[in-house]
Image (cartoon, rainbow, N blue to C red):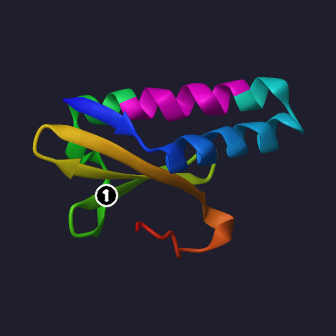
Amino acid sequence: MNINITLRAQKQINSAYWYIRCDSLQYSDEFLSAVYAFIAKIGKNPNIGTIYIKNVRKKLLKKYHYYVYYRIKRESITILGIWHTKRGSQFRVF
């Protein structure tokens, strides 16, 4: 399955990485690896996340307390963004 990452999602991933890096280089590298490993995983199993709204799903990266939001459309998956659990549940898809 084709996987695309929106510019918004890429900025959120980078922002989270640099935020975490202020405290720990190792932990930030592990976080980035976990995000991209999960993205590869949903390419093989797109329904792994729970339904958020309509054709948008979310999956919690428990160790890091971030949700990854993504949309499944025919033969492609679009990563829409990531959202830390402490920020509440108001991730805006659009």
Amino acid residing under circle 1: Arg
Q: Residue 60 versus residue 6: which sits nearer the camera?
A: 6
Q: Is residue 63 visible?
A: no
In the image, what residue occupies the spot 64% across and 33% down?
A: 31
Q: Provide residue 11's location: percent of width, then percent of height.
A: 61, 44
Splitting the image into 4 quarters, where does residue 20 fall? top right
For image coordinates 49% across by 52% down, the residue present is 81
Residue furthest front as drawn: 7
Q: Which of 63 and 52 is in front in this view?
A: 52
Q: Is residue 31 magenta?
A: yes
Question: Percent position (x, y) of residue 72?
Answer: 21, 49
Outermost left residue = 74
Side (left or right) of 15 relative to 39 = right
Q: Which residue is drawn at 21% across and 61% down?
A: 55
Across and down, in percent, residue 14 comes to: 66, 38
**The N terminus is located in which quarter?**
top left
Toward which corner of the image does residue 44 lie, by quadrant?
top left
Instruction: Give coordinates of residue 88: x percent, y percent.
Output: 61, 74
User: In which quadrant of the rendered view does residue 6 lie?
Assistant: top left
Left or right: 73 in relation to 7: left
Q: Using residue 69 as the reference point, say whether residue 77 is left or right of it.
A: left
Magenta segment's dominant SS is helix
Element at badge 1? Answer: strand
**Label 1 Cα crowd, 10 Å radius (few <14 / some 14-19 / many 20+):** many
Question: In the rendered image, which quarter contains the C terminus?
Answer: bottom left
| Foreground of the two, 94 or 37 | 94
Q: Mark 1 points at which residue?
A: 57
- Residue 10 visible in the displayed image: yes
Disc tally is 1
Which residues lie in the magenta part?
A: 29-39
